Image (tube, coloured by chain):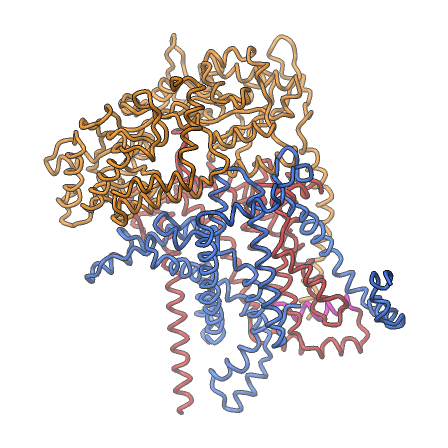
Amino acid sequence: MVKGHSERWFDIVVFTVLLLAGVAAVFPILFVVSMSLTPYGEVLRNGGYVFIPDSITFDAYHYLLEKTKLPRGLMVTLFVTVIGTSLSLLLTMLMAYPLSRRKLNGRSYILLIILFTMLFNGGLIPTYLTVQQVGLLNTVWAMIIPNAVSAFNLLIMKSFFESLPEEIFESAKIDGAKEWRILTTIVAPLSVPSLVTIGLFYMVQYWNLYFQAVLYVQSSDLYPLQVVVRNILMMNQMADNINPEVTLPTVTLQMAAVVAASLPMIMVYPFIQKYFIKGMLLGAIKG
Amino acid sequence: MAQKIINPTTTHRTPSIHRKRWKEIWSQRSWYYMLLPGFIFFIIFKYFPMYGVMISFKDFDLLEGIWRSPWADPWYKHFEYFFQSTYFTQLLTNTFLISLYKITFGMFPDIIMALLLNECRVLWFKRSVQTLTYMPHFLSWVIIYGISLAFLSETTGLLNRWIQSIGFEAIPFLSSTDWFRSVLVGSEIWKDIGWGAIIYLAAMSSIDPSLYEAARVDGASRFRMIWHITLPSITHVFVLLLILRIGHILDAGFEQIYVMYNIRVYPVADIIDTWVYRTGLEQLNFSLASAVGLFKSFIGLWLVLGANAFAKRWGQGVW
Amino acid sequence: MNKHLKLLQTVLAILLTISLLAACGGNNGTSNNGNDTNSTTDSGTSATNEPREIIDIEMVMSTWGTLRPENDFIADKLKEELGINLTITDEVELMEKLNVRAAGSNLPDLMMFGSANDFRDYAKRGLLTDFTPHLEKLDQVQAFLGQGGFDKATVEGKVYGVAKEPTLRAFSYWIRQDWLDNLGLSMPTTLDEFYEVMVAFTEDDPDGNNKNDTYGLTGSFGGLGAFTPILATLGAAPEYQIRDGELVNFYSDPQLKESLTYIKKLADAKVLDPELTTNSGQRMLEKSFQGMTGAIYSTWADMVKDDRVEVWKTANPDAEWAIVPPFQDHVYGEAVDFKDAGATSGFVAISKAAGSNEEKLNRILELFNYISHDEGLRMVQFGLEGEHYNLDGDKVTPTDKASEAAYSWIYQFMGRPEMSYLSTKFANQADWIERAADLPRITTYNGFVTKLQEVNYADRTRFIEEEFLKFVYDKRDINEFDQFVKELKDTFMLDKEIEHAKQILTELGYLKKM
């Protein structure tokens, strides 16, 4: 009885804290969405913010779709994200598996070499020149290949692989399975949550790609979504010496741009969540 | 004599050990094949451009290019320029402190969030909270600054209106040196708490459920189960993240600070990166930016090496 | 288990397709790179007598998100008239992009620089074409811009570009006329009256909502921007002006001390927006439009353009804004603002590579001439005659299709006749524009003065702003002003900079030789 009591308290605490976290997150989000649906003048009349809009207008979204390069940018970003994530995930998995095996000769040197790139880089210009020499400049691939493997994600995945129980590998070895088969038929299926996590990290990395696009792409037809969005957001920040012909984007438009740019990534999340279920590992072994 | 010094390995290892090692490497060749594509990527896009580090020691000229630009005189000229800035000490302190606060106060909420979500038994509720807390990650700092103005502004902010309505003075959260760093840390936690929890949730999902069942049979409370089963299973991820963040201790979050700071809070908010950026706006100087970057990297490298050595004592090193 | 295997197979299949795609993509890329001789022949479009080879020209600039339509009639016209296939790339991070492209010997043919600093830097490093020898070919540009257009773009004795005329400087204080009326106050004519009005705006509930929720003045603190008309009235202006034949530097000017004293008075009376020091971007306009503050240093383009009026009318139907005329208790003459004689609204330059291709260079010079007079100049302002505007003698009347030509300003590489352009294009605001343009302003010469290599201007700016903040908000006694000037001289070589400025302005003939 006493135990049941404390269990209930535990649940209540968990519930309350999570509720608070949810509320803390939902208010500002509500604010962003409401602002994107309310005309700017109304927002100001209300004192500069709106939580529940009185009247809803989709003008800002219409403007985004018709008067900016957002639709085109969305297509570019979709392409870059889908292709980039698959490529990155594959390369990262191929590297993470051997690196997670402690028996690998030269393992710590290779890890150091990889870690080193997280701290040191050649800088803007040499990297640009490399991309230019490889012939990627002004192609979609310039937004994918120079970021193909992230050292951070690689180390995380390696760390996940390391926590797989050693017995699996031993029994596989006894079966005489080749390394490639161990990776594809044992390690990968057992690591679905971590693969999904790293996949999500890569997906968001490609989705939010901005600076590489600006540097490596010269034709505005190849600009991804974030370049269009950043343009809308930053214009107000550096608004001096601007031509009177330019109509500065209103807060309404800015908020609409943000909603439009992040909505797809948010909608994807619930589908990803279901892979974080307790006991994935066990189920996989038995299955 | 001279030959011995050049090739010391031969003196230490007998040829048979040497051969054995090569044999082992040959037996592991499929692992090396797997490493190869990624390795080529690192060589081409990460290591090859590193000759650019030279820029730090040269007076870089766009027309001449990296190789033909003249060497800086003295070679530490650009480092000196940075060290001799009126604000150097302050910049370093601010960068270090803001980063430290973000690490100490920012990493635990992620874990707590993950633990709570993991413990939550009402599935629909768990999923909704998880999605909601994940959303702010996609807002850029410009927008978050807009939101924080709506809540924290001294004149129009909701929070301040409420504070005033119960009879207190408005608090200048965004323009007071006392509050600004807290706002920086707080807004970053808010932005990334749901995002940061993902990685721990992934780690938790690989815990063997039979461990929990065994503990339950033993009559362990849920708190004890968290302590003895859940937390140990995520320490490796935590230590890894911690070490990597320590390596980037001199990156205190340029974009956030650049969007949010103002003249009043410069003394507590101006960091190395914002200084480099402002200096770069005034005069084109790649060498300075490169030198400062190199300085940051060196500090980061030593810290990472130190932190890893420290973590290895508990068998948690990255390599 | 099986399900996961299937997943893996699909991933592998996708990857295979990618690598195939990558091979094709690579080819596309290389053909777009390089820009020395990518001219293509096109015999179809020959409106001129002799069919000319069409030359591709790439221009990089910041268009602030303005889009050109799919069928860009200006581009078509340029192709037809001059045989130029002009591609304009909008760059958000203009200088970053130009820098890496310069490093990769991949600069575009034409560039528009926003800041004199960057332009001079590029010229000095030999990245731009010196077109001093071709100046006589630019007769129309010369006629349109005068010698000034070349003088401002002269670096180390050579002309490296064309400096566009600056856009109309129209800043002044704007004030809520309806608030003045509500409180029975008249338009302030002196600094003292202005102070009284600001106090009344803060304390006497000008919006009549029975709440103490208004302030006098808002704006931005950076460079004392919000207080410019006060500075101007007292005779101070950033950063170099010539007063009674003497060069005066803003920071060592005793009038700055006077101004700071007055501003401190405003701060002490708590009539300033408490967030004046943190306002950025559009924030101060937002506050003015939502009826929190009654005065702001601003311009017609921010206050009375149609979209703006709609915003503040919606927020506050009673609102009425008026321009505050120059204050009468001035020290060195009426002034509401300053105006830089060396200002431009951009520098157009030709890359070295494009300049060494004679055919291309000639075509570019032709382009410059074409958009500097008659039809070409009208086209970049208003569009096509008969379609977007009608011409009656000298007078341009926009047609109802004029909005289709709204993007034409992008092509104004040589600028435009500012006043006639604005009053035609913004007919609703013509009255405001004229009034704002007529206000007296202190002439400054900042645009001519180059910076000292050895000074870190970022540190200097920070130092100055922090000290101003202390003076205004009572953290430092204003009597320490001389100490402040001395600090500037010791740490940031102010004396040397003033000497340097003196030399430049004497050479240019603005200052008399001693």
Where residue C155 sits in the image (x, y, percent)? 53, 23
Asked which quadrant contains residue C395, the reply is top left
Residue C130 inside the magenta-drawn segment: no
Q: Can residue C406 be seen by looking at this rendering?
A: no
Q: Which chain can be seen in orange?
A: C
A265 relative to A100 in the view: left or right: left
Where residue B106 sits in the image (x, y, percent)? 46, 65
Please tell me the colour of chain A. Answer: red
Where residue C386 sits in the image (x, y, percent)? 44, 14
Residue A189 inside the magenta-drawn segment: yes
Where residue B104 sits in the image (x, y, percent)? 47, 67
Asked which quadrant contains residue A174, the reply is bottom right
Quarter of the figure that contains the N terminus of chain C? bottom right
Residue sitting at x 75%, y 70%:
A182
Residue sitting at x 39%, y 77%:
A13
Please tell me the colour of chain B. Answer: blue
Residue sitting at x 56%, y 36%:
A220
Asked which quadrant contains residue A19, the reply is bottom left
Q: Nearer the viewer, residue C81 or A130?
A: A130
Q: Give the main secondary structure of the magenta stretch.
A: helix
Quarter of the figure that contains the C terminus of chain C? top left
Q: Nearer the viewer, residue C190 or C110?
A: C190
First to last magenta residue range: A179-193
C363 relative to C400 in the view: left or right: right
Q: Nearer the viewer, residue C86 or A132?
A: A132
Q: Nearer the viewer, residue A91 or B240?
A: B240
Residue positioned most to the left = C184
